Amino acid sequence: MNLIANLKEMKNYFFKKENIFYLTFILIIFFLDRLSKREIINNFNESVYFINDYINLDLIWNIGIGFGFLSTDSSLLYSLVTLIIGFVILVLLYIFISSKKIDKIIYSIIIGGALGNYYDRLVYKAVPDFIDLHYNNFHWFTFNVADIFISIGILIFIARSFFIKY
C-alpha cells in the first residue's frame, strides 16, 4: 500500500506544471529521432548515400550500445543489456524529477535521446544508425539523431559540472 502511495505522489510531482515543459521537450526530441529513423528505414535503398565530402547516409543496425560496444548474437545478453538500459533511464527520470531547472534541461536532452534508442531496441531488436561522418579514409562511428542529443546532453552536463557549482 505504501508503494502505491509513493507511486501516486511521484506521478503527481512528475506531472507538475513546471515539469510539463521539460516533458514536452523530451517528447519533441524523441519524435525528432523517430521521424529521422522512420524516413531512413522506409526510404533508404542504397548501400551508401553520398551527401558531401564529409557526410554519408549509411544505414546499419546496431545491436550493441554506444559505438557498437557489447554487440553480440546472444539474445540473453541483448535482453540483459536492454533491461539495464531501461533501468538507467528510470534512474535518470528519478534524478530529473528532483533536479533544479538547468539540470532538468540537461536530463531532458539525454532522456529524450535515450528513449529514442530504447524504443528501437524494443521494437526492432537493434538501433538504426545512419549518419556517417568522415574525412578522407577516416570514418567516425555511424550514429543517429538520438545519439546526437545524448552526446550534447552529456557534454553540457560535464561542462556544467566544471563551471556551475551549487
Image (cartoon, rainbow, N blue to C red):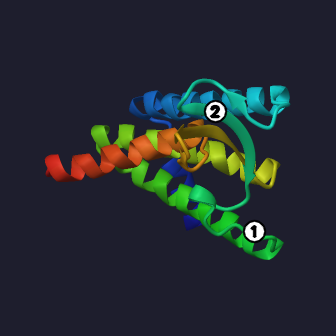
Q: Position of residue 135 (x, y in %)?
A: 50, 39
Contact between marks 1 and 2 (CB within 8 A): the answer is no
Q: How many marks?
A: 2
Query: Pointer 1: residues within 10 angstroms few (<14), some, or many (20+)?
Result: some
Mark 2: few, some, or many residues within 10 Å (few <14, many ≥20)?
some
Is residue 113 placed above or below 43 in the rendered structure?
below
- On the image, numbered disc 1 is attached to which residue? 79
* Residue 59 screen position, x and y as percent: 74, 40
Q: Quadrant of residue 133?
A: top right
Query: Which residue is at 71% across, 33% downward?
Result: 37
C-alpha gap between disc 1 and disc 2: 31 Å
Residue 76 seen anywhere in this rendered image of the structure:
yes
Name the kind of residue labelled 1 in the image.
Ser
Quarter placement of the N terminus: bottom right
Q: Which residue is mark 2?
A: 56
Label 2, secondary structure: give it: strand
Q: Mark 1, mark 2: which one is toward the viewer?
A: 2
The residue nearer to you, when weighing 107 against 73, is 73
Nearer to me, 156 or 134: 134
